[in-house]
Amino acid sequence: MIEKNILCNEKNTIREAINKINENGKGAIFVVDDNCTLLGTVTDGDIRRGLLKGIGLDEAVEKIMVSECIYAYVNDNTTKIWNMFNSKIKIIPIVNEHKQVVDYSEYSSHMKLAIAQPQLNGKELDYLLDGFLSTWISSTGKYVTEFEKKFSDYCGRKFGVATSNGTTALHLALVALGIGKGDEVIVPDITFAATINAVLYTGATPVIVDIEEDGWCIDPDEVERAVTSKTKAIIPVHIYGQPCDMGKIMDIAKKHNLYVVEDCAEAHGAMYDGKKVGSFGDIGCFSFFGNKVITTGEGGMCITNSPELEQKMRLYRDHGMSRERKYYHEVVGFNYRMTNLQAAIGVAQLENIDSTLKWRAELENMYRDSLEKVDGIQLQRNDLPKREKITWLVTAYVDNEKKRDVCMKAMMDADIDVRPFFVPLSEMEIYKKYVFSNTVSTHISKCGFNLPTSYLVGKKEVDRVVNALKSVMS
Ligand SMILES: *Cc1c(COP(=O)(O)O)cnc(C)c1O
Protein backbone atom coordinates (compact mmCIF):
# COMPACT_ATOMS: atom_id res chain seq x y z
CA MET A 1 0.00 0.00 0.00
CA ILE A 2 1.35 3.39 -0.97
CA GLU A 3 1.91 5.85 1.88
CA LYS A 4 -0.78 8.52 2.13
CA ASN A 5 1.59 11.43 2.48
CA ILE A 6 3.13 10.89 -0.94
CA LEU A 7 -0.27 11.48 -2.58
CA CYS A 8 -2.25 14.68 -2.78
CA ASN A 9 -5.78 15.12 -4.08
CA GLU A 10 -6.27 17.65 -6.89
CA LYS A 11 -8.57 19.59 -4.56
CA ASN A 12 -5.93 19.95 -1.85
CA THR A 13 -4.44 23.39 -1.29
CA ILE A 14 -0.84 24.35 -1.77
CA ARG A 15 -0.55 24.69 1.99
CA GLU A 16 -1.67 21.07 2.42
CA ALA A 17 0.83 20.03 -0.22
CA ILE A 18 3.63 21.78 1.68
CA ASN A 19 2.69 19.95 4.87
CA LYS A 20 2.73 16.62 3.06
CA ILE A 21 6.10 17.30 1.48
CA ASN A 22 7.51 18.27 4.86
CA GLU A 23 6.10 15.10 6.32
CA ASN A 24 7.24 12.67 3.65
CA GLY A 25 10.64 14.29 3.36
CA LYS A 26 10.87 13.42 -0.32
CA GLY A 27 10.70 16.92 -1.75
CA ALA A 28 7.68 16.02 -3.94
CA ILE A 29 4.12 14.71 -4.04
CA PHE A 30 1.95 13.08 -6.71
CA VAL A 31 -1.36 14.77 -7.48
CA VAL A 32 -4.26 12.35 -8.04
CA ASP A 33 -8.03 12.51 -8.52
CA ASP A 34 -10.60 10.71 -6.34
CA ASN A 35 -9.83 7.46 -8.16
CA CYS A 36 -6.15 7.75 -7.48
CA THR A 37 -5.43 8.47 -11.15
CA LEU A 38 -2.18 10.32 -11.62
CA LEU A 39 -2.68 13.93 -12.75
CA GLY A 40 0.79 15.35 -12.17
CA THR A 41 3.59 15.99 -9.72
CA VAL A 42 4.54 18.90 -7.49
CA THR A 43 8.01 19.44 -6.05
CA ASP A 44 9.09 21.86 -3.33
CA GLY A 45 10.76 23.85 -6.12
CA ASP A 46 7.44 24.11 -8.03
CA ILE A 47 5.85 25.47 -4.86
CA ARG A 48 8.58 28.03 -4.24
CA ARG A 49 8.39 29.28 -7.82
CA GLY A 50 4.57 29.40 -7.64
CA LEU A 51 4.56 31.45 -4.44
CA LEU A 52 7.06 33.90 -5.89
CA LYS A 53 4.76 34.29 -8.90
CA GLY A 54 1.95 35.33 -6.57
CA ILE A 55 -0.03 32.11 -6.34
CA GLY A 56 -1.55 31.91 -2.84
CA LEU A 57 -1.11 29.18 -0.25
CA ASP A 58 -4.82 28.45 -0.17
CA GLU A 59 -5.20 28.00 -3.91
CA ALA A 60 -5.58 24.52 -5.35
CA VAL A 61 -2.42 22.53 -5.83
CA GLU A 62 -3.46 21.98 -9.48
CA LYS A 63 -2.34 25.54 -10.18
CA ILE A 64 1.30 24.67 -9.82
CA MET A 65 1.17 21.01 -10.73
CA VAL A 66 3.31 19.73 -13.59
CA SER A 67 0.94 17.55 -15.57
CA GLU A 68 3.41 16.34 -18.12
CA CYS A 69 5.36 14.42 -15.56
CA ILE A 70 7.45 11.34 -15.88
CA TYR A 71 5.96 8.08 -14.61
CA ALA A 72 6.53 4.38 -15.00
CA TYR A 73 4.27 1.34 -15.27
CA VAL A 74 4.25 -1.52 -12.78
CA ASN A 75 5.61 -3.87 -15.40
CA ASP A 76 8.49 -1.69 -16.49
CA ASN A 77 11.83 -3.24 -15.70
CA THR A 78 14.18 -1.62 -13.20
CA THR A 79 16.75 -0.54 -15.78
CA LYS A 80 14.11 1.36 -17.66
CA ILE A 81 12.98 3.11 -14.47
CA TRP A 82 16.55 3.67 -13.41
CA ASN A 83 17.25 5.54 -16.65
CA MET A 84 14.40 7.95 -15.96
CA PHE A 85 16.24 9.44 -12.98
CA ASN A 86 18.36 12.51 -13.49
CA SER A 87 19.65 15.42 -11.43
CA LYS A 88 16.12 16.87 -11.20
CA ILE A 89 14.00 13.74 -11.02
CA LYS A 90 14.56 11.78 -7.84
CA ILE A 91 11.18 10.14 -7.38
CA ILE A 92 8.94 8.55 -9.99
CA PRO A 93 5.30 7.49 -9.60
CA ILE A 94 4.49 3.96 -10.72
CA VAL A 95 1.02 3.42 -12.19
CA ASN A 96 -1.17 0.52 -13.30
CA GLU A 97 -2.93 0.19 -16.64
CA HIS A 98 -5.59 2.72 -15.50
CA LYS A 99 -2.85 5.21 -14.64
CA GLN A 100 -3.65 4.80 -10.97
CA VAL A 101 -0.69 5.38 -8.68
CA VAL A 102 0.22 2.12 -6.98
CA ASP A 103 3.83 2.66 -5.98
CA TYR A 104 6.85 4.83 -6.53
CA SER A 105 10.53 4.44 -7.20
CA GLU A 106 13.02 6.55 -5.38
CA TYR A 107 16.57 7.47 -6.17
CA SER A 108 17.12 7.89 -2.45
CA SER A 109 17.83 4.26 -1.70
CA HIS A 110 21.13 5.19 -3.28
CA MET A 111 21.05 8.79 -2.21
CA LYS A 112 23.01 10.50 0.48
CA LEU A 113 21.66 9.85 3.97
CA ALA A 114 21.91 13.11 5.89
CA ILE A 115 23.15 13.27 9.48
CA ALA A 116 20.33 15.60 10.58
CA GLN A 117 17.33 17.35 9.10
CA PRO A 118 14.96 19.87 10.65
CA GLN A 119 11.42 18.52 10.98
CA LEU A 120 8.89 21.21 10.07
CA ASN A 121 5.62 19.36 9.68
CA GLY A 122 3.70 20.80 12.64
CA LYS A 123 2.20 24.28 12.91
CA GLU A 124 5.49 26.02 11.96
CA LEU A 125 4.25 27.51 8.71
CA ASP A 126 0.91 28.64 10.19
CA TYR A 127 2.52 30.45 13.14
CA LEU A 128 5.24 31.88 10.94
CA LEU A 129 2.62 33.32 8.58
CA ASP A 130 0.62 34.61 11.52
CA GLY A 131 3.70 36.40 12.85
CA PHE A 132 4.49 37.72 9.40
CA LEU A 133 0.98 38.99 8.76
CA SER A 134 0.88 40.66 12.19
CA THR A 135 3.92 42.68 11.00
CA TRP A 136 5.58 41.95 14.35
CA ILE A 137 8.58 40.47 12.65
CA SER A 138 11.23 41.97 14.92
CA SER A 139 11.95 40.99 18.48
CA THR A 140 8.72 42.02 20.17
CA GLY A 141 5.51 40.12 19.63
CA LYS A 142 3.44 37.44 21.26
CA TYR A 143 5.46 34.45 20.07
CA VAL A 144 8.64 35.52 21.88
CA THR A 145 6.79 35.78 25.19
CA GLU A 146 4.88 32.57 24.55
CA PHE A 147 8.00 30.64 23.63
CA GLU A 148 9.87 31.90 26.71
CA LYS A 149 6.99 30.95 28.97
CA LYS A 150 6.29 27.55 27.45
CA PHE A 151 9.88 26.43 27.07
CA SER A 152 10.88 27.42 30.62
CA ASP A 153 7.72 25.66 31.89
CA TYR A 154 8.68 22.57 29.92
CA CYS A 155 12.06 22.53 31.66
CA GLY A 156 10.61 23.24 35.08
CA ARG A 157 11.97 26.76 35.55
CA LYS A 158 10.16 30.03 36.21
CA PHE A 159 11.74 32.30 33.63
CA GLY A 160 12.97 32.08 30.06
CA VAL A 161 14.96 34.72 28.20
CA ALA A 162 15.07 34.00 24.46
CA THR A 163 18.28 34.85 22.60
CA SER A 164 19.61 35.01 19.06
CA ASN A 165 21.47 31.70 19.40
CA GLY A 166 22.95 29.26 21.90
CA THR A 167 26.33 30.98 22.00
CA THR A 168 24.81 34.34 22.96
CA ALA A 169 22.72 32.52 25.58
CA LEU A 170 25.92 31.20 27.21
CA HIS A 171 27.62 34.58 27.02
CA LEU A 172 24.56 36.36 28.42
CA ALA A 173 24.37 33.92 31.34
CA LEU A 174 28.01 34.47 32.28
CA VAL A 175 27.71 38.26 32.00
CA ALA A 176 24.56 38.29 34.16
CA LEU A 177 26.47 36.33 36.81
CA GLY A 178 29.15 39.02 36.78
CA ILE A 179 31.90 36.76 35.46
CA GLY A 180 34.86 38.56 33.92
CA LYS A 181 38.58 39.19 33.96
CA GLY A 182 40.47 37.42 36.71
CA ASP A 183 37.81 34.73 37.15
CA GLU A 184 38.19 31.08 36.24
CA VAL A 185 35.41 29.02 34.66
CA ILE A 186 35.64 25.22 34.41
CA VAL A 187 34.55 23.62 31.11
CA PRO A 188 34.78 20.05 29.72
CA ASP A 189 37.35 19.14 27.06
CA ILE A 190 34.68 17.55 24.84
CA THR A 191 32.12 20.11 23.72
CA PHE A 192 31.33 22.42 20.85
CA ALA A 193 33.71 25.43 20.85
CA ALA A 194 30.90 27.89 21.72
CA THR A 195 31.10 26.77 25.36
CA ILE A 196 34.70 27.92 25.83
CA ASN A 197 34.33 30.90 23.49
CA ALA A 198 31.55 32.32 25.67
CA VAL A 199 33.95 32.21 28.64
CA LEU A 200 36.67 33.93 26.62
CA TYR A 201 34.28 36.71 25.49
CA THR A 202 33.85 37.72 29.14
CA GLY A 203 37.61 38.03 29.68
CA ALA A 204 37.58 35.19 32.22
CA THR A 205 40.02 32.27 32.01
CA PRO A 206 38.59 28.90 30.98
CA VAL A 207 39.93 25.80 32.70
CA ILE A 208 39.52 22.68 30.57
CA VAL A 209 38.98 19.42 32.45
CA ASP A 210 38.66 15.80 31.41
CA ILE A 211 35.45 13.83 30.83
CA GLU A 212 34.02 10.66 32.39
CA GLU A 213 34.76 7.36 30.71
CA ASP A 214 31.17 6.15 30.80
CA GLY A 215 29.03 9.28 30.33
CA TRP A 216 31.49 11.38 28.28
CA CYS A 217 30.36 14.42 30.30
CA ILE A 218 32.56 16.64 32.47
CA ASP A 219 34.17 14.52 35.21
CA PRO A 220 33.07 15.82 38.65
CA ASP A 221 36.30 14.55 40.28
CA GLU A 222 38.36 16.54 37.79
CA VAL A 223 36.18 19.59 38.42
CA GLU A 224 36.90 19.35 42.12
CA ARG A 225 40.65 18.97 41.49
CA ALA A 226 40.64 22.03 39.22
CA VAL A 227 38.95 24.42 41.67
CA THR A 228 41.16 27.31 42.82
CA SER A 229 40.49 30.50 44.77
CA LYS A 230 39.75 32.19 41.44
CA THR A 231 37.13 29.69 40.26
CA LYS A 232 33.73 31.33 39.85
CA ALA A 233 31.66 28.92 37.78
CA ILE A 234 31.31 25.48 36.20
CA ILE A 235 29.74 24.88 32.80
CA PRO A 236 28.60 21.26 32.66
CA VAL A 237 27.73 20.32 29.06
CA HIS A 238 25.09 17.62 28.60
CA ILE A 239 26.89 16.11 25.66
CA TYR A 240 25.16 14.19 22.85
CA GLY A 241 21.94 14.13 24.87
CA GLN A 242 23.59 12.66 28.00
CA PRO A 243 22.90 14.47 31.28
CA CYS A 244 25.96 15.26 33.40
CA ASP A 245 26.24 13.88 36.92
CA MET A 246 24.37 16.88 38.29
CA GLY A 247 24.19 15.47 41.83
CA LYS A 248 27.97 15.55 42.27
CA ILE A 249 28.40 18.78 40.33
CA MET A 250 25.87 20.69 42.44
CA ASP A 251 27.52 19.36 45.62
CA ILE A 252 30.91 20.64 44.47
CA ALA A 253 29.39 23.98 43.48
CA LYS A 254 27.78 24.37 46.87
CA LYS A 255 30.92 23.39 48.74
CA HIS A 256 33.10 25.92 46.88
CA ASN A 257 30.41 28.55 46.35
CA LEU A 258 30.48 28.38 42.55
CA TYR A 259 27.90 29.28 39.96
CA VAL A 260 26.64 26.58 37.61
CA VAL A 261 25.65 27.41 34.02
CA GLU A 262 24.37 24.32 32.24
CA ASP A 263 25.02 24.02 28.51
CA CYS A 264 21.92 22.12 27.39
CA ALA A 265 22.31 22.77 23.64
CA GLU A 266 22.32 19.05 22.83
CA ALA A 267 19.96 17.71 25.45
CA HIS A 268 16.48 19.30 25.37
CA GLY A 269 14.29 17.21 27.64
CA ALA A 270 17.02 14.96 29.11
CA MET A 271 16.64 14.25 32.82
CA TYR A 272 18.78 13.67 35.87
CA ASP A 273 17.09 12.16 38.89
CA GLY A 274 13.68 12.89 37.39
CA LYS A 275 14.37 16.57 36.73
CA LYS A 276 15.00 18.16 33.34
CA VAL A 277 18.47 19.41 32.49
CA GLY A 278 18.70 23.18 32.71
CA SER A 279 16.82 23.18 36.00
CA PHE A 280 19.80 22.43 38.28
CA GLY A 281 22.21 25.31 37.83
CA ASP A 282 21.77 29.05 38.31
CA ILE A 283 21.07 29.32 34.58
CA GLY A 284 20.42 26.73 31.87
CA CYS A 285 21.35 27.62 28.28
CA PHE A 286 19.80 26.11 25.18
CA SER A 287 20.43 26.33 21.44
CA PHE A 288 17.75 26.04 18.75
CA PHE A 289 20.10 25.75 15.78
CA GLY A 290 18.82 23.76 12.80
CA ASN A 291 20.36 20.46 13.88
CA LYS A 292 19.22 20.51 17.52
CA VAL A 293 16.26 18.59 18.97
CA ILE A 294 13.95 21.55 18.45
CA THR A 295 14.92 24.45 16.25
CA THR A 296 14.10 28.04 15.42
CA GLY A 297 16.68 28.17 12.61
CA GLU A 298 19.06 30.14 14.78
CA GLY A 299 18.09 30.79 18.38
CA GLY A 300 18.71 30.13 22.03
CA MET A 301 17.33 30.57 25.52
CA CYS A 302 18.49 31.08 29.10
CA ILE A 303 16.25 29.67 31.80
CA THR A 304 16.42 30.44 35.52
CA ASN A 305 14.40 30.53 38.72
CA SER A 306 15.92 33.80 39.89
CA PRO A 307 13.96 36.99 39.13
CA GLU A 308 17.16 39.05 39.60
CA LEU A 309 19.05 37.01 37.02
CA GLU A 310 16.10 37.13 34.65
CA GLN A 311 15.98 40.93 34.88
CA LYS A 312 19.73 41.20 34.41
CA MET A 313 19.71 38.93 31.38
CA ARG A 314 16.89 40.95 29.79
CA LEU A 315 18.77 44.17 30.46
CA TYR A 316 22.01 42.93 28.90
CA ARG A 317 20.19 41.24 26.03
CA ASP A 318 18.32 44.44 25.10
CA HIS A 319 21.26 46.85 24.68
CA GLY A 320 21.52 47.48 28.43
CA MET A 321 18.69 49.95 28.07
CA SER A 322 16.71 51.01 31.14
CA ARG A 323 13.16 49.72 31.25
CA GLU A 324 11.97 52.90 32.97
CA ARG A 325 13.81 55.44 30.89
CA LYS A 326 14.01 54.98 27.11
CA TYR A 327 17.44 55.37 25.53
CA TYR A 328 19.10 55.56 28.92
CA HIS A 329 21.65 52.75 29.08
CA GLU A 330 22.53 51.38 32.50
CA VAL A 331 25.19 48.90 31.39
CA VAL A 332 27.14 48.13 28.22
CA GLY A 333 24.65 45.67 26.81
CA PHE A 334 24.25 43.57 23.68
CA ASN A 335 21.62 42.95 21.07
CA TYR A 336 21.10 39.23 21.64
CA ARG A 337 17.37 39.07 20.95
CA MET A 338 15.33 36.42 19.16
CA THR A 339 12.84 37.58 16.53
CA ASN A 340 9.11 36.92 16.72
CA LEU A 341 9.38 34.86 13.52
CA GLN A 342 12.01 32.57 15.05
CA ALA A 343 9.90 32.24 18.20
CA ALA A 344 6.82 31.39 16.08
CA ILE A 345 8.71 28.38 14.71
CA GLY A 346 9.88 27.56 18.23
CA VAL A 347 6.35 27.47 19.64
CA ALA A 348 5.30 25.04 16.90
CA GLN A 349 8.39 22.90 17.46
CA LEU A 350 7.76 22.76 21.20
CA GLU A 351 4.21 21.51 20.64
CA ASN A 352 5.72 18.38 19.11
CA ILE A 353 8.73 17.88 21.36
CA ASP A 354 7.35 14.73 22.98
CA SER A 355 6.78 12.99 19.67
CA THR A 356 10.15 14.24 18.41
CA LEU A 357 11.93 12.76 21.43
CA LYS A 358 9.95 9.56 20.96
CA TRP A 359 10.97 8.90 17.37
CA ARG A 360 14.52 9.85 18.25
CA ALA A 361 14.60 7.30 21.08
CA GLU A 362 13.03 4.65 18.84
CA LEU A 363 15.59 5.31 16.13
CA GLU A 364 18.44 4.94 18.60
CA ASN A 365 16.93 1.68 19.83
CA MET A 366 16.67 0.45 16.26
CA TYR A 367 20.38 1.18 15.74
CA ARG A 368 21.14 -0.42 19.11
CA ASP A 369 19.31 -3.64 18.26
CA SER A 370 20.89 -3.95 14.83
CA LEU A 371 24.40 -3.10 15.97
CA GLU A 372 24.25 -5.64 18.78
CA LYS A 373 25.19 -8.27 16.23
CA VAL A 374 28.20 -6.30 15.02
CA ASP A 375 31.24 -7.02 17.17
CA GLY A 376 33.37 -4.11 18.28
CA ILE A 377 30.85 -1.29 17.83
CA GLN A 378 29.00 0.17 20.78
CA LEU A 379 26.52 2.95 21.16
CA GLN A 380 26.67 5.72 23.73
CA ARG A 381 25.74 4.47 27.21
CA ASN A 382 22.07 4.79 28.16
CA ASP A 383 22.16 2.89 31.43
CA LEU A 384 23.86 5.29 33.85
CA PRO A 385 22.20 5.67 37.26
CA LYS A 386 19.75 8.58 37.56
CA ARG A 387 20.46 9.73 33.99
CA GLU A 388 17.76 9.66 31.33
CA LYS A 389 19.50 10.64 28.14
CA ILE A 390 17.68 11.77 25.05
CA THR A 391 18.82 11.11 21.49
CA TRP A 392 20.37 14.08 19.79
CA LEU A 393 22.76 12.47 17.32
CA VAL A 394 23.10 8.72 17.65
CA THR A 395 26.70 8.20 18.70
CA ALA A 396 28.74 5.06 18.13
CA TYR A 397 32.25 4.20 19.21
CA VAL A 398 34.93 1.59 18.61
CA ASP A 399 38.10 0.95 20.57
CA ASN A 400 40.69 2.78 18.49
CA GLU A 401 41.20 5.52 15.96
CA LYS A 402 42.15 3.23 13.08
CA LYS A 403 38.90 1.27 13.37
CA ARG A 404 36.94 4.50 13.65
CA ASP A 405 38.41 5.83 10.43
CA VAL A 406 37.67 2.55 8.65
CA CYS A 407 34.04 2.73 9.82
CA MET A 408 33.69 6.33 8.73
CA LYS A 409 35.16 5.58 5.33
CA ALA A 410 32.80 2.62 4.84
CA MET A 411 29.86 4.89 5.58
CA MET A 412 31.05 7.65 3.27
CA ASP A 413 31.63 5.11 0.49
CA ALA A 414 28.00 4.06 0.92
CA ASP A 415 26.93 7.72 0.64
CA ILE A 416 26.00 7.93 4.29
CA ASP A 417 26.71 11.16 6.11
CA VAL A 418 28.86 10.56 9.18
CA ARG A 419 30.42 12.94 11.69
CA PRO A 420 33.46 12.35 13.83
CA PHE A 421 33.32 13.18 17.52
CA PHE A 422 34.09 16.75 18.53
CA VAL A 423 37.80 17.51 18.44
CA PRO A 424 38.84 17.98 22.08
CA LEU A 425 39.40 21.63 22.94
CA SER A 426 42.82 20.65 24.31
CA GLU A 427 43.90 19.57 20.84
CA MET A 428 43.41 22.99 19.29
CA GLU A 429 46.20 25.56 19.22
CA ILE A 430 43.99 28.42 20.42
CA TYR A 431 42.69 26.60 23.50
CA LYS A 432 45.66 24.40 24.47
CA LYS A 433 46.96 26.78 27.08
CA TYR A 434 43.82 26.38 29.20
CA VAL A 435 44.10 22.61 29.73
CA PHE A 436 43.99 21.16 33.20
CA SER A 437 43.41 17.48 32.30
CA ASN A 438 42.51 15.55 29.13
CA THR A 439 43.49 11.86 29.27
CA VAL A 440 40.07 10.27 28.69
CA SER A 441 38.85 12.93 26.26
CA THR A 442 41.94 12.52 24.05
CA HIS A 443 41.27 8.81 23.72
CA ILE A 444 37.47 8.85 23.39
CA SER A 445 37.39 11.65 20.84
CA LYS A 446 39.34 9.46 18.42
CA CYS A 447 36.95 6.53 18.73
CA GLY A 448 33.51 8.08 18.31
CA PHE A 449 31.32 9.02 15.38
CA ASN A 450 27.71 10.09 14.81
CA LEU A 451 25.18 8.21 12.69
CA PRO A 452 22.36 9.76 10.62
CA THR A 453 19.65 10.83 13.05
CA SER A 454 16.65 12.29 11.32
CA TYR A 455 12.95 11.54 11.00
CA LEU A 456 13.66 10.33 7.47
CA VAL A 457 15.79 7.46 8.77
CA GLY A 458 13.69 4.30 9.06
CA LYS A 459 14.39 0.57 9.30
CA LYS A 460 15.60 0.43 5.68
CA GLU A 461 18.11 3.22 6.24
CA VAL A 462 19.28 1.77 9.55
CA ASP A 463 19.97 -1.49 7.71
CA ARG A 464 21.95 0.39 5.12
CA VAL A 465 24.12 1.99 7.81
CA VAL A 466 24.54 -1.23 9.76
CA ASN A 467 25.44 -3.18 6.63
CA ALA A 468 28.12 -0.64 5.73
CA LEU A 469 29.59 -1.01 9.23
CA LYS A 470 29.26 -4.78 9.25
CA SER A 471 31.23 -5.04 6.02
CA VAL A 472 34.33 -3.59 7.68
CA MET A 473 33.95 -4.86 11.23
CA SER A 474 33.74 -8.59 10.58
C1 LIG B 1 25.17 23.91 19.26
C2 LIG B 1 25.92 24.11 20.52
C3 LIG B 1 26.16 25.39 21.04
C4 LIG B 1 25.96 26.64 20.28
O1 LIG B 1 24.71 26.94 19.87
P1 LIG B 1 24.47 27.93 18.63
O2 LIG B 1 23.00 28.12 18.67
O3 LIG B 1 24.94 27.23 17.41
O4 LIG B 1 25.22 29.18 18.89
C5 LIG B 1 26.75 25.49 22.30
N1 LIG B 1 27.11 24.39 22.98
C6 LIG B 1 26.93 23.16 22.50
C7 LIG B 1 27.36 21.98 23.33
C8 LIG B 1 26.35 22.96 21.25
O5 LIG B 1 26.19 21.73 20.76
Image: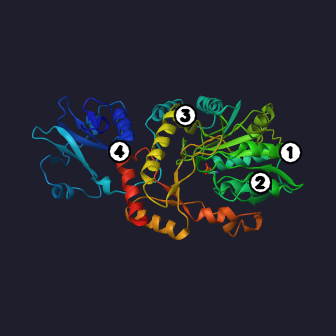
Q: Secondary structure at mark 4?
A: helix
* First of labels 2, 3 by sequence position: 2
Q: Which residue, given by chain and number where applicable, does mark 1 sit on?
A: 255
Q: Residue at x 90, y 54 (%)?
A: 229
Q: CA distance from mark 2 to mark 3?
A: 35 Å
The quarter of the image holding the C terminus is bottom left
Locate the N terminus and report the quarter of the image it occupies: top left
Q: What amino acid is found at the position of numbered circle 4 in the picture? A: Asp
Between residues 223 and 177, which one lies in front from this camera angle? 223
Query: Dot 2 surroundings within 10 Å: few (below 14), some, or many (20 or more)?
Result: some
Cα separation, mark 2 vs mark 4, equals 52 Å
Q: Considering only vertical position in the picture, is 33 above or below 338?
A: above
> Which residue has dot 2 on it?
221
Kindly report the distance in space between the C-alpha atoms of the residues bearing marks 4 and 1. Answer: 56 Å
Structural crowding at the residue carrying mark 3, measured as other residues with C-alpha within 10 Å and reported as few (<14), some (14–19) or many (≥20) = some
Of the numbered discs 4 and 3, the one sitting upstream in the chain is 4
Give the left or right position of residue 363, taking residue 199 as reference: left
Camera-nearest label, 2 or 4: 2
* Residue wearing tag 4: 44
User: Marks 2 and 3: which is nearer the front?
Assistant: 2
Q: Can you identify the residue that label 3 sits on?
A: 350
Extreme-left residue of the structure: 97
Q: Left or right: 466 with respect to 85? A: right
Say what amino acid the circle numbered 3 marks.
Leu
CA–CA distance between discs 2 and 1?
13 Å
Report if residue 138 is visible in the image: yes
Q: Nearer the viewer, residue 374 or 387?
A: 374
Q: Which mark is residue 42?
A: none
